[in-house]
């Protein structure tokens, strides 16, 4: 058996066409969805991410601004700028690129974003709304993973799902979304005792640990759907996920590649959240 490849690039392209159509409809009514992206410091990976986000906005007809701030920007000045953007009616979504310099409290910064403009879905108010099944915004990466499962018509209700990784950005909200879709969910981490005993039971396996190729074929239930959220750079410069793609694709029924899997979907869901924020006004 060779697994179906869930092509994130192709799915993202399809969804972005729908987003562009809805955006054009809003623009025709006099409202152009707007996203503000704030980058503090010179982290190379972050610079690539923010450029991709801004370009994606422009490609679907949205308004976007990218603000680059020096690494020594004070926390108070950053909070002041966020407050100004909270009041700006042309901006419907605010994204502060993480990680921030160590002298800035990331939690305080995230909490300063108005919940109705928190298109990353990280604000406590939005995390709480997700918890009770009434999300204003779903965090972009888990939301993208759910769209990928939807794209292959996978019957989530009643399925056994295992999420490896318990971060606030991916693991926890991923588990909540699967739970709300009717799955029976187990959350593990890289230190879970006898991890393979859990992974072998999973109909849906979502991996977000940041450990290259840690999930091998012998840890996967035959026929499982495997969603690889990880992206790691190997010593030879090549990118790989947290799943050993070559071996696991011979066991799984469907699998996401790295790159070209979850990554493109994350930015697409950011666009969708921004669009929905604009549509609510």
Image (tube, helix red, strand yellow):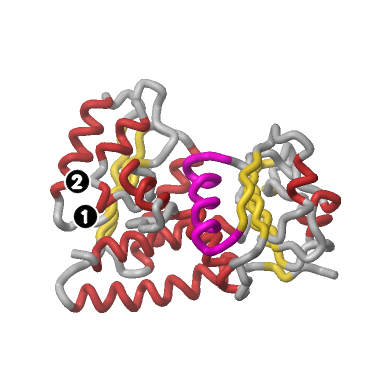
Viewer-closest of 275 and 44:
275
Q: Position of residue 188 (x, y in %)?
A: 65, 41
Q: Position of residue 152 (x, y in %)?
A: 62, 74
Q: Residues within 10 Å of mark 1 (few under 14, many from 20)?
A: many
Viewer-closest of 268 and 135:
135
Check disc 1 and report its element: helix, strand or loop: loop
> Horizontal placement of 219 versus 38: left or right?
right
Question: Which residues lie in the magenta part?
Answer: 166-183
The CA span between labels 1 and 2 is: 7 Å
Q: How many callouts does the rendering have? A: 2
Q: The N terminus lies in which quarter of the figure?
A: bottom right
The image shows residue 203, relative to residue 210, as above or below, that is: below
What residue is drawn where x is 26% and y is 24%?
Answer: 74
What residue is drawn where x is 71% and y is 61%?
Answer: 203
Quadrant in which residue 21 is drawn: bottom left
Q: Which residue is mark 2?
A: 85
Q: Do we see residue 36 in this rendering?
A: no
**Does 219 appear in magenta?**
no
Quadrant in which residue 254 is drawn: bottom right
């Amino acid at each position: 058996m060779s697994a179906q490849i869930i092509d994130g690039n192709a799915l993202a392209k399809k969804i972005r066409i729908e987003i562009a159509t809805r955006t054009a409809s809003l623009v025709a009514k006099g409202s152009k969805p707007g996203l503000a992206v704030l980058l503090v410091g010179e982290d190379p990976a972050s610079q690539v991410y923010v450029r991709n986000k801004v370009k994606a906005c422009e490609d679907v007809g949205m308004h976007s601004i990218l603000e680059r701030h020096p690494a020594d920007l004070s926390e108070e000045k950053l909070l002041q700028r966020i407050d100004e953007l909270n009041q700006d009616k042309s901006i419907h979504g605010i994204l502060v690129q993480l990680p921030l310099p160590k002298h800035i409290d990331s939690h305080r910064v995230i909490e300063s974003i108005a919940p109705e403009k928190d298109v990353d879905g990280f604000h406590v108010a939005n995390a709480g709304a997700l918890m009770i099944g009434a999300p204003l915004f779903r965090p972009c990466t888990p939301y993208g993973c759910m769209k990928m499962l939807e794209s292959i018509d996978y019957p989530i209700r009643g399925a056994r799902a295992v999420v490896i990784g318990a971060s606030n950005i991916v693991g926890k909200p991923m588990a909540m979304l699967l739970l709300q879709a009717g799955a029976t969910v187990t959350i593990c981490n890289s230190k879970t005792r006898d991890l393979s005993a859990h992974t072998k039971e999973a109909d849906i396996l979502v991996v977000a640990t940041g450990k290259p190729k840690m999930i091998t074929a012998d840890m996967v239930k035959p026929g499982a759907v495997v969603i690889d959220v990880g992206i790691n750079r190997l010593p030879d410069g090549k990118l790989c996920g947290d799943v050993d793609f070559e071996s696991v694709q011979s066991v799984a029924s469907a699998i996401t590649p790295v790159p070209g899997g979850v990554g493109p979907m994350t930015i697409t869901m950011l666009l969708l959240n921004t669009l929905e924020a604009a549509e609510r006004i």
